[in-house]
Amino acid sequence: MRRRNAAMGGTSTRRATRAARWLCSFLGLLAAIALGGCGGANTSTNGLAPAPVSVSFTSSAIHGDKLPALYTCDGKNIAPPVSWGNVPSGVEELALFALGTRTNKLGQTALSIEWAMAGVQPALHHLNAGEIPHGAFLESDSTGQQRYSICPKKGETKRYSFVLYALPRGSRASRGFPGPNLFRNLTTVTAGLETQVNGAFPAHYTRR
């Protein structure tokens, strides 16, 4: 990611925004692994940290949190249609993610990025199933591939979270930046990134 041609990064003591905290409660033990802990309200040394802004983020294809097979490897394995509400004027672009879990080599549960799309214009407010709009692009998932893929093991039920994050004006995601790194940067508020705008919805799927 870059902010006026500078990489977005650096250290921070402020933790995950509202959607990230919601993700922690939704996926439980991912907190320490993915987000460095499910902190409480965002704070700063002077107590004046900006409050997160929640944006409505939904999918017309998902009812009762159940992800239809069409949007998995049992179907077309394309991203479901998504819609979002009004976004504050200080937003440059959006990044969308599908998050899941995996077991690492140590047998621990870890966050898995199943889909990462950046460069999405906030004014669109809607993406059709599988759509990559003009100017947007896929970043790599946790396997290093630029794709969307929801594909649990046969007979397995897995829970997912679809998440939207906004990049403040003057900040853009760079093509080829790994999706897991992009997500990490967006869920750890760094110095100079004034806006904290996000939205999320859950889904689950049982593989045939």
Image (tube, rainbow, N blue to C red):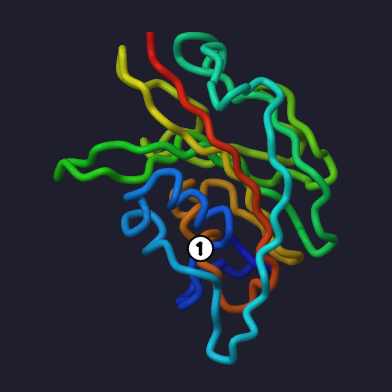
Q: Which is more toward the observer, 116 or 28? A: 28
Quadrant in the picture for the N terminus: bottom right
**Residue placed furthest toward the left:** 106
Which residue lies at the image location 53% right of the left edge and 21% below the top edge? 66
Which residue lies at the image location 56% right of the left edge and 67% below the top edge? 8
| Above-or-below relation of 104 to 43 | above
| Above-or-below relation of 29 to 4 | above
126 left or right of 147 in image: right
Could you tell me residue 36's position as x and y percent?
A: 37, 63
Which residue lies at the image location 52% right of the left edge and 37% below the top edge? 98
| Above-or-below relation of 184 to 123 | below
Could you tell me residue 170's position as x and y percent?
A: 74, 66
132 left or right of 126 in image: left
Q: Which is more toward the observer, 135 or 192? A: 192
User: Mark 1: few, some, or many residues within 10 Å (few <14, many ≥20)?
Assistant: many
* Quadrant position of residue 142: top left
Quadrant in the picture for the C terminus: top left
Which residue lies at the image location 50% right of the left edge and 52% below the top edge? 183
Residue at mark 1: 16
Could you tell me residue 131's position as x and y percent?
A: 69, 26
Q: Which is more toward the observer, 175 or 27? A: 27
> What secondary structure is marked by label 1?
loop
| Above-or-below relation of 157 to 76 | below
Could you tell me residue 172's position as x and y percent?
A: 67, 58
The kind of residue tagged 1 is Ala
44 left or right of 151 in image: right
